[in-house]
Every structure is written in structure tokens, then in C-alpha cells.
Amino acid sequence: MIEMPTIWTVTDASVSVLWVKVKGEDYRLVRKARQLYRNIVTGKYRVALPFHWRLEVAGALRSFVAARKLSLSEARKAIKWLTGFALEHCVVCEPTVSWDESVAVSDEWGFHLYDTLYLLLAQRVGGVFWTADLRLYRQWHQRPDLHGIKVAWIGYYPNTGVPLVPP
């Protein structure tokens, strides 16, 4: 049997919550995110998640409940399901650098600390960091010095190249 090489990817909470049925989400992004999900489940990718991923997912689900896009019962099922997904298909990672260095890099790059942790993890594993956060993607796109870190907007899945014009 021929073993396939490991292809790493990183997904943030903005992509992960697209796997949950939430009222009003952009169906095109949902379709692309679910395509990535199927590729993860079938073994095409190994997923590295930063330790704070579950907190971000829980926060997003809580926001959906507050906006009445999801019931509390649905949110509970979703967090249980996503936690199970992470246990079965992902490697949850501690920060790749010290906290002091994480904060310094966040300040230097101009990203939120959570986003910086995803970027550093993608850099560490050499995988593509998938996000549905257009603000983050556009901010990264305008930093050619960071294009050595592979970042992709889920709306382009499965294409990972840097487009000439961001979405």
C-alpha cells in the first residue's frame, strides 16, 4: 500500500462554523467550506488547530444564538459535534512561540492576537490557513512580506494561489 504524504491545513473558527447549519449564511461559502470538510474527513488533509479554536467556535455559536440564527439546543449540538470533529480529525496545538513573542509578532504584523496564532501555526506546519474572514484575508493580502505563509479565503476553495485582486 502506498502511503500518501501528509498535507497540513489550518482552519479558523470562521470556516468551522460554516459546517454548521446556520440561518442566513452565504450558501457559496457554506458549499466551499463543506467541500473542505469532506476533504478533511476523507483524509486528504491533516488539520492543525490552535488551542483557542474551540473558544472562538463557542463564541461564534453564542453570537448566532443571540442573533436568533441558531437555537441554544442547536448550538449545544454544534459545539459537541465540532469538538468531536476536532478530536477525531485534528491536532490541537499549543502556541508555536512564547506568549511574549506572539504578542510582539501580533504588534509587528498588525493582526489580532488570535489571527496571529493561526498564521504562526500555518507557518509552523507549512500548511494552508483557510479563513472565511475577509478582513483578515485582505489584511494578509496587502502584506507581501507575509505571503510565505499560505493563507486562503474559503470562497476560493480549493484554489490557494494569491489572486491579483482580493475578494
Image (cartoon, rainbow, N blue to C red):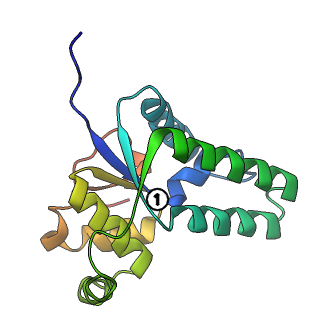
Q: Is residue 130 left or right of residue 109?
A: right
Tell me, yes or no, if residue 88 can be seen here.
yes
Residue bearing mark 1: 12
The spot of residue 87 in percent (x, y) is 53, 45
The residue nearer to you, when weighing 57 against 14, is: 57
Q: Is residue 139 left or right of residue 82?
A: left
Vertical position of residue 37 compared to residue 77: above or below: above
The spot of residue 121 in percent (x, y) is 30, 62
Vertical position of residue 113 compared to residue 161: above or below: below
Amino acid at dot 1: Asp
The residue nearer to you, when weighing 40 against 166, is: 40
- Residue found 77% across the figure and 47% down from its top: 77
Tell me, yes or no, if residue 163 can be seen here.
no
The spot of residue 152 in percent (x, y) is 33, 54
- Residue found 35% across the figure and 36% down from its top: 45
- Residue found 38% across the figure and 66% down from its top: 94
Q: Secondary structure at mark 1?
A: loop
Vertical position of residue 29 compared to residue 141: above or below: above
Q: Is residue 128 left or right of residue 2?
A: right
- Quarter occupied by the N terminus: top left
- Residue found 18% across the figure and 69% down from its top: 146
The spot of residue 130 in percent (x, y) is 39, 53
Please identify the residue farthest to the top as the structure is shown.
1
Count of picture labels: 1
- Quarter occupied by the C terminus: bottom left
